[in-house]
Image: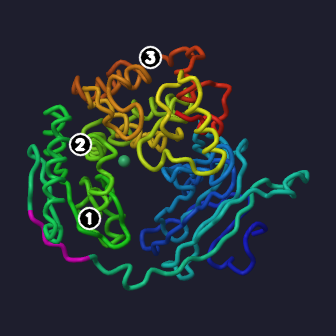
């Protein structure tokens, strides 16, 4: 308990380094664990089974330092719906090799083991990990420290079912769109959305639209849903999360637009229907590819392109995310804009691509670019279209060609991916993408395009 705030021990079992393992039994209460990463390196949260195996690793991005992503595309926290008595370990290190046993944690920097206790299980346990600062220089001292608080229990308001929606049914290329009838008070937004869905569906190959439709994927549109904003795809296995949030669990496997005004407000950042292509790509990934979002071909390419080749550390993005956030960025942008012009268009600050978030977003983002076969700046993030993607990341393009155009489900008997290409030579183009190996992640992200 040395690293925890005094007085909260009853809410959480905690051990600095002696392993805790999970309890068993199906009749345990539900609990919520939230890990906030305020330190300067990535953390991992992993479930420790009753048998001492490590499963279900989750990465928690750092909240500061050179690896932090500050464009709001990645959260520095992870919330885990769990059961009282389930044990977890929080550690730094082993970024490329997820450990499967407690012994494999030997070379990791362990922050601690923890398990929620039975005390007031409805209140979320919040563990915040920070750099130890000055004291970390002492021999044997930990460089990461954890503190613990307990959040408020959900109120009746939080848990009661949301508005009993009444839907009107629309379709776009055979895909069902269920629209909350309140949206029709300003019906022009619905008509624009349905037209965008049609434009999006036309970007997809016909067999992909059929696969999405046959899997039962609908698009569900709401006027508002309380605290929820923007649009997402709910994975087919997501029923329990939906239930916990007060949503209909039949939304699993569907696209949900939480608030129509959000869509109307930022649809111009993509070509027509671009953000819907993104969500339909999630559906195709989940429903059609072998092992869904766990498909190893997509996962492997994501790891190489994002973590090994660092292709997506700093790219151009349309909209407010490209605006300079401080005086240093404003100065750098001004210098770039007045320089010789060899860097191409200079219209904002380069940011870490949303595709770098995880394998699912990688597939959805780059599919949105891939499925634009003309020269339009279609996706919000660069590469914006297929031609640019072929130039910038041909290996991913080849994989997407197999997925979308060859209609392969990427089964095990498909040919494996080729080895990664050799590093590219130094030139303006490479600099612009921040892909030079000697450039640190933070400085690469600050390059201006
Ligand atoms: Zn997404």
**How far is disc 3 from disc 1 in space, using C-alphas?**
40 Å
The colour mode here is: rainbow
Residue 53 appearing in the image = no
> For residue 105, what is the image quadrant?
top right
State which tag comes first along the sequence, 1 or 2. Answer: 1
Location of the N terminus (image quadrant)? bottom right
Secondary element at image label 1: helix
Secondary element at image label 2: loop
- Image coordinates of residue 378 in percent, x first then y, are 31, 36
Q: Residues within 10 Å of mark 1 (few under 14, many from 20)?
A: some
Q: Is residue 164 magenta?
A: yes
Q: Check disc 1 and report the residue beneath it.
A: 249
Q: Check disc 3 and report the residue beneath it.
A: 418
Q: Main secondary structure of the magenta part?
A: loop
Q: Is residue 309 above or below residue 251?
A: above
- What residue span does the magenta drawing correspond to? 163-168
């Amino acid at each position: 308990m040395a690293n925890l705030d005094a007085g909260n021990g009853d809410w959480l079992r905690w051990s600095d380094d002696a392993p805790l393992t999970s309890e068993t039994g199906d009749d345990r209460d539900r609990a919520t664990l939230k890990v906030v990463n305020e330190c300067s390196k990535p953390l991992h949260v992993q479930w420790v089974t009753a048998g001492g195996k490590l499963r279900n690793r989750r990465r928690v991005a750092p909240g500061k330092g050179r690896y932090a992503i500050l464009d709001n595309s990645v959260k520095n926290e992870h919330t885990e719906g769990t059961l009282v008595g389930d044990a977890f370990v929080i550690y730094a290190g082993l970024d490329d090799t997820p450990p499967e046993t407690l012994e494999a944690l030997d070379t990791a920097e362990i922050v601690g083991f923890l398990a929620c206790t039975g005390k007031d299980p409805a209140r979320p346990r919040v563990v915040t990990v920070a750099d130890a600062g000055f004291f970390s220089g002492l021999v044997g001292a930990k460089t990461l420290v954890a503190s613990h608080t307990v959040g408020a229990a959900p109120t009746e308001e939080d848990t009661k079912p949301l508005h009993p929606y009444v839907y009107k049914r629309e379709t776009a290329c055979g895909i069902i769109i269920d629209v909350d009838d309140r949206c029709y008070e300003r019906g022009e937004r619905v008509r624009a959305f349905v037209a965008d869905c049609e434009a999006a569906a036309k970007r997809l190959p016909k067999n992909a639209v059929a696969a999405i439709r046959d899997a039962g994927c609908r698009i569900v549109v709401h006027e508002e849903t309380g605290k929820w904003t923007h649009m997402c795809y709910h994975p087919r296995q997501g029923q329990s999360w939906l239930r916990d949030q007060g949503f209909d669990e039949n939304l699993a496997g569907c696209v949900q637009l939480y608030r129509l005004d959000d869509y109307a407000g930022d649809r111009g950042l993509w070509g027509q229907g671009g953000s819907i292509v993104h969500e339909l790509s999630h559906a195709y990934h989940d429903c059609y590819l072998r092992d869904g979002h766990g498909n190893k071909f997509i996962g492997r390419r994501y790891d190489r392109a994002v973590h090994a080749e660092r292709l997506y550390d700093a790219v151009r993005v349309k909209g407010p995310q490209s605006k300079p956030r401080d005086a240093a960025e404003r100065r750098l942008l001004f210098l770039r804009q007045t320089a010789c012009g060899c860097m191409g268009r200079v219209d904002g600050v380069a940011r870490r691509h949303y595709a770098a978030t995880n394998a699912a977003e990688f597939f959805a983002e780059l599919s949105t670019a891939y499925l634009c076969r003309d020269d339009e700046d279609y996706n919000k993030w660069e590469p914006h279209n297929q031609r640019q993607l072929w130039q910038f990341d041909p290996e991913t393009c080849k994989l997407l060609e197999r997925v979308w155009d060859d209609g392969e489900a990427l089964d095990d008997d498909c040919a494996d991916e080729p080895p990664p290409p050799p590093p590219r030579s130094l030139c303006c183009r490479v600099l612009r993408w921040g892909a030079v190996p000697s450039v640190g992640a933070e400085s690469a992200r600050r390059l201006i395009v």
